């Protein structure tokens, strides 16, 4: 079956006054129709940049590679073509619901905006549909809420509004960029549940971006782990969690608290490298417990779903 | 501002006027006494309206040589008002041009030029800009004294540039906010997002600029009327202050204050219309 | 510091050197002949003497009035932060209210007062400086107040409060030293604004007298020459004024950027 979203060799480069910076390099992944993919990485790992660049939402970035959504070319597409896709076939929710809603627009109008832009509905019809959408994301008294301004709402409510606006045109693909990071823990769980439910009900593709491996693994069938602008490992969630092959992923797992776990959590020593500096070899080598001299010599390519010269074998996972 | 009007009055009334006779700009002893008695009353708060009463009853204020009736002042004020309106329109047009240029061309090669223009305008005293305008007029063979359009253009230069900078900075700041990105992700084109989302949110910043714009128009009217010798309210005021003509100064200062209050009141009203947060805050305090 | 600020600083040093050099040469009676000739308004003065004197007076005005208004602003802001509550709000609102009155209007009224009380064509230098301080305190007061407020939110200041260091001591010993670079930047940016305001008010006839002009007063009295063959008698004053304003602005801007970056 053909993929809903197909990305190959995506590279995003920024030219700054102090030299160039490659924020994402050779990123490839695909999402089948109705499938779920989680992209995990620390801040600055290039996960948001990769996705935003696909939709043409990074002005000033130089984007290369190929990407297609439902067979339509994304990279190299004109601004008008992308504008037509955004909010219609592919929708997006952002990290901070407090600032991602326009403060001077009524909430209902913002949910209705994609309907008016893409479906050409008149104001009344769009408003009615928006109210229904607000109800479907579990907001109480939606008709009243539609007339409120964002600053009247709580963080959780606002993120639900963002979701409602994203779903307005029944997109084939929903991209959620750290959708719960700015929310309280209890609200986080509710929003994640809502996203998972909507994904199942509407059979839409979902790309969930997060720094939280645990959160993503609950919802997504496939995982993609990024480090310093590169994909370090990808694969089905179950396999990745039980038998990670890249030392960074193993380290991430070891530093994630579990219900059964006892004892001290392990941390990964060191910090993410500066992407402006030349990085000849493996970018994780400096922090890697398994690193050998060869690791820093030449670039490591993604082989058999893992970017490591000496990947871990399942038997060596005793420390997890 | 009404307080400042009363303050100016009390200040003027209680000044120890110099009364020697060899001054170049003379207020003779008789003049000074006449001022106190007829124009300014005895100097208490209760007499703050004496100059106004005189104007309303058709009498004149001012020194013996240059009396001003309400009609004279009205004529001067209407000239200034007309100039101010033309200048405001010119300023808005210039501001829009500058703002659009700064938002659209910021990254291009002429971008730095657009930073130089504000530096040039804010970095030179206004009368020198008027001189440049006059020299240009002379170069094109136009007589510059008495030119209303040139005067309005000089008046518009400061506030227009200021507004253009504020406008483009506000638009750029709004376009960098997450909701702008969210609007793009919902399917707005860049232009739609700028017009429908960034612009309404940039309006409060523009309103904050309204008061400085009003006072810089006022400043401009002083300089331009003085330079182009237009008998507007600004020139009347300047000449009265130079002549030490207390009656006219009191009346005119009060009028200026009133205009500035009206502007700031109007700004607050408009703010309630465009900013939902301000509206809520107003409801809470009411 | 970037190259623009350095260039600005160099220009300021050169301009100051010019005035001192001129004064020294005058004292030694070794003044070379002025290439621009005599001041057409006052045949006994040379253009050089008038213009460099004007530069000196403009510098003096700008620096003293700038320092005065910034010191007043700092003192007010410190008082406001120390006393807090209604007093602080009062100063804040007062500064805002005063800020909304056009500077020029106040200066014209003050010029009028000077004429009414002491007579004469222009105002004296001390009166001018006092007037400029009187109008210049409001904007820096607001800025310094905001700066102090945000500095006081830093964790180690909260910690100092928590271990019981008296408020006044915290303000003077911990908060104020961190604000010095910002204060200096505000002062440096204040100076060109004051010089410009003074030029405009001088042009309108409420500034220094023509026999002891500032750069602005000289330009205001001689601009008519620009349309004649005698334009060279005005151009130097214009160039010096522009240099002075731009140089102060660049140095101040550079310092302000550095102060912002440091946080």
Image (tube, coloured by chain):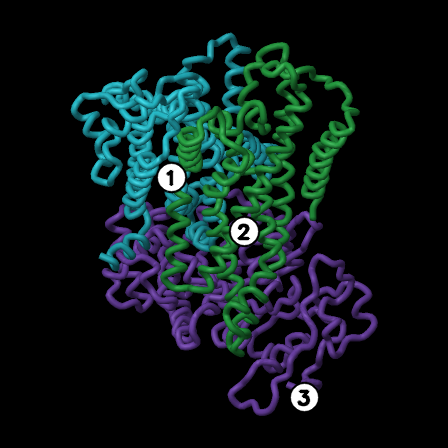
Chain colours: A purple, B cyan, C green
In the rendered structure, the residue with mark 2 lies on which chain? C
Alpha carbons under labels 1 and 2: distance apart:
29 Å
Quarter the C terminus of chain A occupies: bottom right
Task: Give the residue at mark 1.
Answer: B210
Q: Residues within 10 Å of mark 1 (few under 14, many from 20)?
A: some
Alpha carbons under labels 2 and 3: distance apart:
68 Å
Query: What residue lies at 24% left-to-right and 28% top-to-bottom?
Result: B37
In the rendered structure, the residue with mark 1 lies on which chain? B
Q: Is residue A94 above or below residue A73?
A: below
Query: What residue lies at 66% left-to-right and 58% top-to-bottom?
Result: A25
Query: In this orientation, does residue B96 appear?
Result: no
Query: What residue lies at 70% left-to-right and 34% top-to-bottom?
Result: C15
For residue A318, the mark is: 3
Q: Residues within 10 Å of mark 2 (few under 14, many from 20)?
A: some
Query: What residue lies at 41% left-to-right and 69% top-to-bottom?
Result: A195
Residue B229 rendering spot, x and y as whole percentages = 42, 16
Residue A90 rendering spot, x and y as whole percentages = 45, 56
- Give yes or no for contact between labels 1 and 3 (Cβ–Cβ under 8 Å): no
Alpha carbons under labels 1 and 3: distance apart:
69 Å
Task: Give the residue at mark 2.
Answer: C71
Between B175 and A211, the residue placed more toward the observer is: B175
In the rendered structure, the residue with mark 3 lies on which chain? A
Q: Quadrant of residue B9?
A: top left
Give left or right: position of A82 versus B214: right
- Element type at mark 3: loop
């Amino acid at each position: 079956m053909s993929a809903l979203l197909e990305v190959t060799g995506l590279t995003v480069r920024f030219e700054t006054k102090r030299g160039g910076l490659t924020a994402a390099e050779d990123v490839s992944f695909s999402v089948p129709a109705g499938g779920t993919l989680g992209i995990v990485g620390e801040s600055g790992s290039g996960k948001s940049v990769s996705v935003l660049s696909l939709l043409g939402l990074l002005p000033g970035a130089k984007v290369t590679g190929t990407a297609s959504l439902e067979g339509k070319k994304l990279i190299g597409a004109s601004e008008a073509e992308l504008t037509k896709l955004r909010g219609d076939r592919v929708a997006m929710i952002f990290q901070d619901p407090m600032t991602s809603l326009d403060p001077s627009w009524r909430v209902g109008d913002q949910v209705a905006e994609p309907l008016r832009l893409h479906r050409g509905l008149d104001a009344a019809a769009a408003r009615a549909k928006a109210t229904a959408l607000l109800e479907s994301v579990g907001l109480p008294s939606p008709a009243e809420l539609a007339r409120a301004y964002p600053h009247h709402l709580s963080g959780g409510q606002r993120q639900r509004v963002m979701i409602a606006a994203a779903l307005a045109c029944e997109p084939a693909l929903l991209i959620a960029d750290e959708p719960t990071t700015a929310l309280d823990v209890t609200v986080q769980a509710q929003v994640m549940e809502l996203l998972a439910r909507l994904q199942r009900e509407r059979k839409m593709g979902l790309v969930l971006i997060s720094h939280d491996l645990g959160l993503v693994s609950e919802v997504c069938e496939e995982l993609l782990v990024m480090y310093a602008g590169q994909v370090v490992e990808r694969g089905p969630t179950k396999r990745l969690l039980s038998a990670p092959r890249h030392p960074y992923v193993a380290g991430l797992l070891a530093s994630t608290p579990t219900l059964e776990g006892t004892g001290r959590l392990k941390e990964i020593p060191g910090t993410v490298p500066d992407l402006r500096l030349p990085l000849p070899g493996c970018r994780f080598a400096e922090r890697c417990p398994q690193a050998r001299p060869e690791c820093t010599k030449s670039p490591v390519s993604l082989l058999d779903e893992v970017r490591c010269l000496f990947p871990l074998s399942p038997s060596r996972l005793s420390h997890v | 501002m009404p307080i400042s009007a009363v303050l100016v009055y009390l200040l003027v009334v209680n000044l120890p006027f110099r009364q020697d006779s060899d001054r170049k700009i003379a207020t003779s002893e008789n003049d000074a006494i006449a001022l106190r008695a007829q124009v300014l009353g005895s100097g208490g708060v209760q007499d703050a309206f004496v100059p106004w009463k005189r104007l309303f009853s058709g009498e004149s204020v001012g020194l013996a040589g240059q009396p001003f009736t309400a009609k004279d002042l009205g004529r001067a004020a209407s000239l200034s008002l007309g100039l101010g309106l033309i200048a405001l329109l010119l300023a808005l047009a210039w501001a829009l041009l500058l703002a659009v240029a700064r938002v659209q061309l910021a990254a291009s090669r002429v971008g730095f030029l657009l930073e130089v223009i504000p530096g040039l305008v804010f970095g030179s005293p206004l009368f020198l800009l008027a001189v440049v305008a006059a020299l240009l007029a002379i170069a094109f063979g136009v007589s510059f004294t008495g030119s209303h359009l040139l005067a309005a253009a000089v008046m518009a230069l400061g506030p227009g540039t200021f507004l253009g900078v504020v406008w483009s900075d506000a638009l750029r700041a709004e376009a960098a906010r997450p909701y702008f990105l969210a609007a793009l992700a919902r399917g707005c084109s860049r232009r739609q997002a700028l017009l429908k989302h960034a612009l309404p949110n940039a309006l409060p910043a523009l309103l904050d600029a309204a008061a400085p714009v009003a006072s810089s128009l006022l400043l401009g009217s002083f300089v331009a009327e003085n330079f182009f010798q237009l008998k507007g309210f600004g020139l009347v005021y300047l000449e009265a202050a130079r002549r030490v003509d207390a009656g006219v100064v009191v009346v005119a200062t009060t009028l200026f204050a009133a205009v500035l209050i009206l502007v700031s009141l109007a700004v607050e009203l408009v703010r309630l219309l465009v900013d939902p947060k301000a509206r809520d805050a107003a409801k809470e305090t009411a | 510091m970037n190259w623009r600020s350095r260039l600005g600083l160099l220009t300021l040093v050169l301009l100051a050197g010019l005035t001192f050099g001129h004064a020294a040469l005058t004292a030694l009676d070794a003044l070379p002949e002025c290439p621009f000739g005599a001041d057409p308004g006052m045949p006994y003065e040379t253009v050089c003497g008038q213009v460099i004197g004007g530069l000196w007076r403009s510098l003096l005005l700008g620096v003293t009035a700038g320092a005065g208004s910034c010191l007043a602003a700092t003192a007010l802001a410190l008082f406001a932060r120390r006393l807090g509550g209604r007093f602080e709000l009062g100063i804040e609102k007062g500064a805002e209210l005063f800020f909304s009155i056009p500077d020029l209007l106040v200066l014209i009224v003050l010029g009028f007062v000077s004429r009414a009380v002491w007579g004469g064509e222009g105002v004296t230098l001390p009166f001018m400086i006092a007037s400029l301080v009187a109008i210049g305190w409001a904007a820096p007061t607001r800025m310094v107040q905001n700066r102090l407020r945000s500095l006081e939110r830093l964790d180690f200041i909260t910690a100092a409060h928590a271990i019981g260091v008296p408020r006044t001591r915290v303000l003077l010993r911990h908060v104020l030293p961190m604000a010095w670079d910002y204060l200096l930047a505000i002062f440096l940016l204040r100076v060109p604004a004051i010089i410009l305001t003074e030029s405009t008010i001088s042009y309108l006839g409420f500034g220094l007298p023509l026999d002891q002009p500032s750069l602005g007063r000289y330009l205001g009295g001689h601009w008519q020459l620009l349309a004649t063959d005698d334009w060279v008698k005005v151009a130097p004053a214009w160039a010096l004024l522009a240099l002075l304003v731009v140089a102060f602005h660049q140095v101040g801007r550079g310092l302000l950027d550095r102060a912002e970056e440091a946080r």
